[in-house]
């Protein structure tokens, strides 16, 4: 079987996760930066194109040359298609010294002359003024939490914006890839990138057959609160990706999930109802893992009591399952999934 961190074919130059020998650095404020020549060509008759989405519609008359990406992993999608964005949000959660992700930087290093995009602070919402100063001819926000007001401000400035198709933060990586591919006029390449990424899922599922049909709950105790748990719904990317590997949500999760919501809360009195073949969560440290394993509250969850659970401590290991893209998923499939498979068999974080 080929290594899971490799993709082949037309998209290999931008999708391969190789050892990063030099870190690309670039502007960190809103100062304008030059666009880099794309490494791929647009499809014939790709423009003009009109794309409908939850906040409106975007009409793109010709190939965009200055793309700004809004959303945690949003910049991965144009880059996976050979287009370097001139602006992208700062990556603080599991980010690196470039306010970027290692996956993005590794793909960026494959493109001659490419520099880091201007990194935008999204702490207080979409920084509309700074985006306008970058003079983009396209903003992609397919997996973001952009509000209607922010969208209207950008479009009133004459910038076409492609937002999420349904609800904030619930877009699948396939949907984002399709929408960004349409907006960039690279639908054929987007289809190939999707097919190659899905091949990795098939190869991973084949390598870990114990995942097929295994039920799971993905959640954990709410921070600073010993009285409730959060649980991700089937609309969140984490459960979606596990389902792509053949795993299944429990009936409890299905019954308590609401449309358009990516999580719900459960009181500690109902902890025993979070029963599944495996329980998946996060921990800030190994000490926190030990506390979860021994805490009477969390041990009410049957999978934790039976060591059929896994708590990811290394954020970069699991980030591809919370913010999936063609750049982050290969690493998550290679590094995160084996731990999930081990937990299914009773060799979990408590061992």
Image (cartoon, helix red, strand yellow):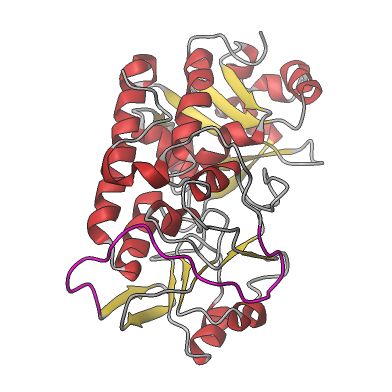
| Image coords of residue 122 (percent x, y) | 67, 66
Q: Quadrant of residue 129?
A: bottom right
Front-most of residues 278 and 182 = 182
Front-most of residues 214 and 335 = 335
What residue is drawn where x is 44% and y is 42%? Answer: 255
Residue 251 painted magenta? no
77 horizontally vs 304: left or right: left
Q: How many marks?
A: 0
Which quarter of the rendering shows the C terminus?
top right
| Image coords of residue 212 (percent x, y) | 34, 21
What residue is drawn where x is 48% and y is 61%? Answer: 84
| Image coords of residue 272 (percent x, y) | 61, 25
Front-most of residues 136 and 197 = 136
Q: Which residues are magenta?
A: 26-47
What residue is drawn where x is 47% and y is 36%? Answer: 17
Residue 35 painted magenta? yes
In the image, residue 19 above or below residue 210: below
Q: Residue furthest front?
A: 113
Helix, strand or loop: magenta stretch: loop
Q: Quadrant of residue 19?
A: top right
What residue is drawn where x is 77% and y is 18%? Answer: 290
| Image coords of residue 46 (percent x, y) | 22, 72
């Amino acid at each position: 079987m080929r290594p899971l961190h490799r993709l082949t074919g037309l998209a290999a130059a931008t999708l391969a996760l190789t050892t990063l020998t030099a870190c690309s650095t670039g502007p960190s404020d809103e100062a304008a930066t030059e666009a880099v020549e794309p490494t791929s060509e647009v499809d014939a008759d790709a423009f003009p194109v009109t794309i409908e989405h939850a906040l409106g519609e975007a009409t793109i008359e010709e190939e965009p040359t200055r793309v700004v990406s809004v959303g945690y992993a949003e910049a991965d999608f144009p880059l996976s298609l050979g287009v370097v964005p001139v602006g992208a949000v700062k990556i603080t959660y599991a980010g690196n010294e470039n306010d970027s992700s290692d996956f993005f930087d590794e793909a960026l290093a494959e493109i001659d002359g490419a520099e880091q995009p201007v990194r935008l602070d999204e702490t207080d919402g979409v920084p509309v003024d700074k985006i306008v100063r970058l003079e983009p001819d396209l903003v992609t926000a397919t997996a973001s939490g952009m509000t209607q007001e922010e969208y209207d401000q950008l479009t009133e400035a004459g910038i076409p914006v492609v937002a999420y198709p349904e609800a904030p933060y619930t877009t699948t990586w396939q949907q984002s890839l399709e929408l960004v591919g349409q907006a960039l006029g690279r639908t054929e390449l987007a289809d190939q990138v999707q097919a190659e990424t899905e091949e990795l899922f098939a190869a991973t599922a084949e390598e870990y057959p114990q995942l097929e049909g295994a039920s799971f709950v993905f959640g954990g105790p709410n921070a600073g609160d010993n009285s409730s748990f959060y649980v991700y719904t089937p609309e969140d990317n984490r459960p979606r990706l596990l389902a792509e590997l053949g795993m299944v949500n429990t009936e409890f999760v299905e019954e308590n999930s609401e449309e358009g919501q990516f999580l719900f809360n459960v009181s500690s009195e109902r902890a025993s109802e979070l029963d599944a073949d495996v329980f998946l969560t996060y921990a800030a440290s190994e000490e926190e893992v030990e506390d979860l394993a021994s805490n009477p509250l969390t041990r009410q969850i049957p999978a934790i009591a039976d060591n059929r659970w896994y708590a990811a401590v290394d954020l970069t290991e699991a980030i591809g399952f919370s913010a999936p893209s063609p750049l982050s998923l290969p690493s998550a499939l290679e590094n995160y999934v084996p731990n999930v498979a081990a937990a299914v068999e009773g060799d979990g974080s408590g061992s």
